[in-house]
Amino acid sequence: MECGAAAWALLERVRRSAPLVHCITNLVSMDLVANALLAAGASPAMVHSLREVPEFAPRAAALVVNVGTLSEPWLPAMRAAAAAAADAGRPWVLDPVAASASEFRMDACLGLLALRPTVVRGNPSEIIALASASRIRDAKGVDSSHESIDAVEAAKSLALSSGAVVAVSGAVDFITDGQNVIGAHNGVPMMRKITATGCAVTALIAAFVAVDPTNTLEATACALSIFGLAGELGMEMAKGPASLRMHLIDSLYGLDEKTVASRVRNKRVSLNSYLHLSK
């Protein structure tokens, strides 16, 4: 199946089934995460109480754990939710925001990684840091000090060691299971000027994997391309980051088969093309 047709098929499945996505996400991102999921047709649930998550997580179709505004009271709930989702056979996605910013944050991310997420999505610096299990001293908080191509080998290594599909966001998003690599080429630079777009696409990945759990690599790539395409369409109407945020959500809601089929740009990355991109 062509990549555009595959992306449309998954988006249609999300819209038909409205998967319940359990989100333990950061305080800054909750609004955009919830609205992006709703626009795509999924059903968000922001549940983070330790007393509630062991019961709730198995009921959801997928779980997102995002450590952006990490605090000690939330960490046990993140661990409990991940364990409950895994025990119930539900996919879960880890977003290791600013993993290298502090020892506490890195330890938390490594502990969550040990609970075997289905997908890990981060920026290049986050993925490199997790793969090496060491802090990057020049890390820029939630921003990245690397390009996505710089993190492909780290992503492959992390995928092989963790068993997760690993997605690296950037000008080109790279998605790998440790053996295969897909490049997702949709998106616009101004999306980086809107806080929580990365968090939102992590949640969208969870929704896509929920409806196609046996093809995690492709589902992850399709989610990234769909979100990037919505950004491209939104940019055609936007005047700046604030209006792009609004139009991105509207565009995600209004995506149609013709547009998705013709404009999604996912490509398998061969060794030769990877070497070319690395130069």
Image (spheres, grey):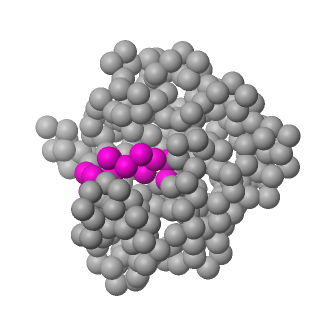
The correct choice, above or below, for 21 with respect to 121 in the image is below
- From the top left corner, tell me how far across and down residue 117 is, in percent: 62, 42
- From the top left corner, tell me how far across and down residue 181 is, in percent: 37, 49
192 in magenta: yes
Front residue (pair 156, 171): 171
The correct choice, above or below, for 149 with respect to 30 in the image is above
- From the top left corner, tell me how far across and down residue 105 is, in percent: 56, 23
- The answer to whether any part of residue 7 appears in the image is no
Start and end of the magenta stretch? 188-200
The correct choice, above or below, for 107 with respect to 146 in the image is above
Label the magenta part by its dominant secondary structure.
helix
- From the top left corner, tell me how far across and down residue 201 is, in percent: 47, 54
The quadrant where residue 80 appears: top right
User: Is 161 placed left or right of 231 in the picture?
Assistant: right
Q: Quadrant of the N terminus?
A: bottom left
Q: Quadrant of the C terminus?
A: top left
Front residue (pair 63, 155): 63
Residue occupying image coordinates x 58% and y 41%: 27
Front residue (pair 144, 128): 144
Residue occupying image coordinates x 37% and y 49%: 194
User: Is 19 placed left or right of 218 in the picture?
Assistant: right
The quadrant where residue 14 appears: bottom right
The correct choice, above or below, for 54 with respect to 133 in the image is below
Residue occupying image coordinates x 57% and y 67%: 38
Residue occupying image coordinates x 36% and y 34%: 143
